[in-house]
Amino acid sequence: MKRRTFLKTGAAAASGAFTLAAPSLALAATSLKFDSYVSDSAGPSWIDRWYLDELEKRTEGEVSIRRYWSGSLNKVGEHLGAVRDGTSEMTLISPGYYQSELPVTRGLEWYFRMNRADALQKVCRDVYDQFDPLRAEWEDRHRSKVLYWTNWNYAPLILRDPITSLGDIKGKRIRAYGVSADVVEALGGTAVAMAAPEVYQALERGILDGVYGFDFVTAIAYKLHEIAPQFYDIGDGPHAPAATIMNKRVYDGLPDDVRKISDEIVDDIYGGQFSAIYEDVLATYVKTAEAEGVTLSTVSDEQKAMAKDMVQPAQVNSWLEDTAKPAGIDGEEMQSLIDAAIKKYDAEATLKRPYEISQAS
């Protein structure tokens, strides 16, 4: 890519498409802000860092990206509005923090429905492409382009003390948010909503007995295992779809060659890079976890089947009745697209859960 050609194209975009946007967008063709509420070592951050690095590298440095991690630019819950309104150009969005603002997207959030995180990413991509209300929710309502779908890979049940069955969860106070709270409550626990930075201290002080809906990589990165070393695979499948988004005006106003490069990087993510990155990351974190005293366990197949029956289809039906129907969303159509995509991708997916990696090593 030739620097002079790029800068000329970028200047034209800035003087055209960006003039009606917020002032911060004027330099968006050459300088972008990426803003995340989690640390650079948290689960999805490994994919985000790869995308950002590749965008800078493949544009030969003509696109530069300032990175703000751990809520250093916007606080938890503010990122969707920041990108929509143009005060940030790019961010990671976990829909569980925006339940009223993303009712359609909430139809992608559930447990005990599929097995592999690399399949969930493709399921979300296909439904975004096929279901107009989902795409409109992001692109029209929130003026954002979903660059790629990601997720928090796998979220074990993390406890201070060992259990002999899922029945032992009854009465335990377990941090959860969004649909993960449904699982905790269905299994007899008490779901406690709590921001991620507060969880370690709450475990340490005995306010919490455990954590659920906190992905494995982030849990180890945040050192939760120092207080709660019992990690259980309960057969719930991949955890929490998320989306990395860009302000749509910025995306549409990028020079054609930059937008093409971005799209090619995204194709690489869906084409296997997601799995390749997480295979290495999960393997490394499993070794770290076990070396630092974590016990990786699984409940029996019978217990997994029992948990699934307690959560599904009640969780999906709740979204259909309480969210989709009042909002005029054709939830049945969306869920049928999800079912078809799961059938297409889940059986061929390969990304192992932490317990499986531990057993194979």
Image (cartoon, helix red, strand yellow):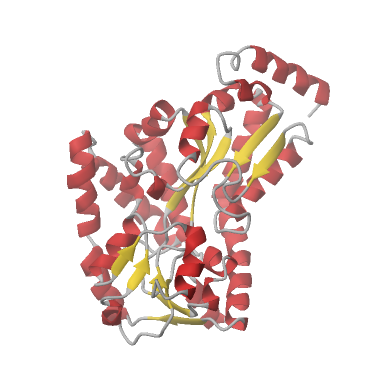
Point out residue 324 in the picture as x, y percentages from the top left corner. Answer: 23, 41
Residue at (42, 55) in percent of width and height: 240
Picture coordinates of residue 117, whole percent (x, y): 46, 59
- Above-or-below relation of 280 to 300: above
Name the one closer to the observer, 200 or 255.
Answer: 200
Q: Residue at x 26, y 66 (%)?
A: 185
- Report which quarter residue 162 is drawn in: bottom left
State the quadrant of the N terminus. Answer: top right
The spot of residue 215 in percent (x, y) is 48, 63
Q: Which residue lies most toward the bottom here? A: 164
Q: Quadrant of the C terminus?
A: bottom right
Q: Is residue 222 left or right of residue 113?
A: right
Percent position of residue 196, x then y: 48, 59
For residue 141, what is the image quadrant? top left
Res 66 seen here: yes
Quadrant position of residue 44: bottom right
Residue 46 against residue 135 in the figure, above or below: below
Closest to the observer, 134 or 94: 94
Q: Is residue 139 above or below residue 192?
A: above
In the picture, measured across the screen, residue 352 lies left or right of residue 190, that is: right
Q: Residue furthest front?
A: 205
Taking the spot 66% from the left edge, 17% from the top edge, the residue there is 14
Q: How many marks?
A: 0
The relative height of residue 271 versus residue 80 in the rendered view (above or below) is: below
Tell me, yes or no, if residue 111 can be seen here. Answer: no
* Of the pair 5 and 80, the residue shown nearer to us: 80
